[in-house]
């Protein structure tokens, strides 16, 4: 075995390992199979596309090996197995597969985005209900100065300790409690002035609703941005892989066809 033959064999073996590794990973990623689940489809397509270059490298190594063989001996003329034919067929099938993944992935991304926006709307509705409950509680507390003082004292103690029922509070939770305590303190001072109290209650309502709408817009913008990034990244990557594999497969099969036409009967 000369150096060229040994190099060709190593390249073919390495290329075959690349291809088989990709196919094995694809089968593994598909388990457990749950094609009806949009999130499963997104994860599967994303993983396959991210590894889509692996079999292309394997195909390239095998084609280089066949070129080395052609410089040493004419394998096809001696009736040897032409490994290029299954390689080109595989490339064509992969090109078709990656092309079909594009609309599937885009559709699933849109479904997930719509579901996320639905969850955001539900959160907004719950937030509105919480605001109304909080305002109702404030109105009740304003009519009971003693209870109002207790609420202020309780929040102050929680803020100072940084814990509630044995659980450490986050910075956002502490900020919310501080805001509520300050609002209660202001309401306590305004409870003796009904007109000013009513005006202040309306200001609190507008402030809370504004904050809620700001969080809704931020969540929706984040969901739209993630969907766009995911769709573009995987969609364009899958398109490039589809073009690459289809190009290799089409030119390869066309070349083999032309070669067969020129070969003597």
Image (tube, rainbow, N blue to C red):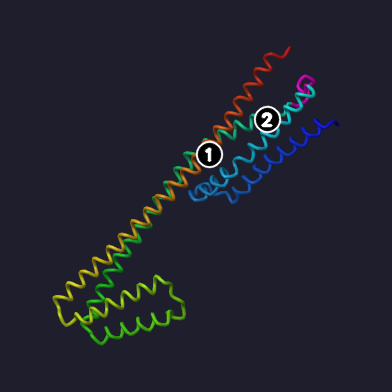
Give the residues drawn in magenta, as a range.
74-81
Task: Report the number of discs.
Answer: 2
15 inside magenta stretch: no
Q: Which residue is labeled 2 in the image?
A: 86
Q: Quadrant of the N terminus?
A: top right
Query: Which mark's residue is nearer the viewer, 1 or 2?
Result: 1
Q: Position of residue 75 (x, y in %)?
A: 77, 23
Where residue 171 sits, quadrant-wise, is bottom left
- Residue 140 x, y percent position in the rendering: 23, 79
Instruction: Characterize the local packing of mark 1: few (<14), some (14-19) or many (20 or more) Cα atoms within 10 angstroms.
Output: many
Q: Residue at x 57, y 45 (%)?
A: 50
Determine the CA span between mark 1 and mark 2: 22 Å
Q: As drawn, is 38 to the left or to the right of 124?
A: right
Residue receiving disc 1? 238
Judge by depth and name the residue closer to the eye, 150 or 7: 7
Return the x and y of residue 79 as percentages of the image width and height. 78, 22
Above or below, comparing residue 145 to residue 168 in the picture: below
Query: For this view, does 222 lie left or right of residue 46?
Result: left
Judged from the image, the secondary structure of the residue bearing numbered disc 2 is helix
Which residue is rendered at x = 56% and y = 36% of the image? 241
Give the mark nearest the N terminus, 1 or 2: 2
Secondary structure under badge 1? helix
């Amino acid at each position: 075995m000369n150096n060229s033959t040994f190099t060709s064999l190593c390249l073919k073996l390495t290329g075959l390992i690349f291809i088989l590794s990709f196919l094995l990973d694809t089968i593994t990623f598909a388990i457990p199979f749950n094609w009806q689940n949009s999130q499963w489809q997104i994860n599967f397509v994303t993983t396959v596309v991210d590894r889509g270059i692996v079999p292309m490298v394997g195909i390239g190594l095998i084609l280089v090996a066949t070129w080395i063989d052609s410089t040493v001996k004419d394998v096809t003329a001696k009736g040897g197995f032409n490994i290029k034919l299954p390689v080109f067929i595989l490339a064509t099938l992969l090109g078709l597969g990656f092309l079909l993944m594009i609309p599937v992935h885009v559709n699933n991304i849109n479904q997930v985005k719509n579901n996320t926006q639905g969850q955001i709307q539900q959160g907004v509705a719950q937030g509105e209900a919480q605001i109304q409950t909080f305002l109702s509680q404030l109105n009740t507390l304003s009519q009971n100065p003693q209870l109002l003082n207790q609420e202020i004292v309780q929040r102050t103690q929680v803020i100072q300790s940084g814990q509630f029922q044995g659980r450490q509070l986050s910075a956002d939770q502490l900020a919310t409690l501080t805001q509520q305590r300050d609002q209660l303190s202001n309401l306590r001072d305004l409870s003796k002035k009904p007109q000013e109290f009513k005006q202040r209650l309306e200001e609190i309502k507008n402030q809370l609703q504004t904050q809620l709408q700001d969080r809704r817009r931020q969540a929706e913008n984040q969901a739209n941005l993630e969907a766009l990034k995911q769709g573009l990244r995987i969609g364009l990557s899958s398109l490039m892989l589809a073009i690459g594999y289809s190009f290799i497969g089409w030119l390869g099969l066309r070349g083999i066809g032309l070669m067969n036409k020129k070969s003597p009967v």
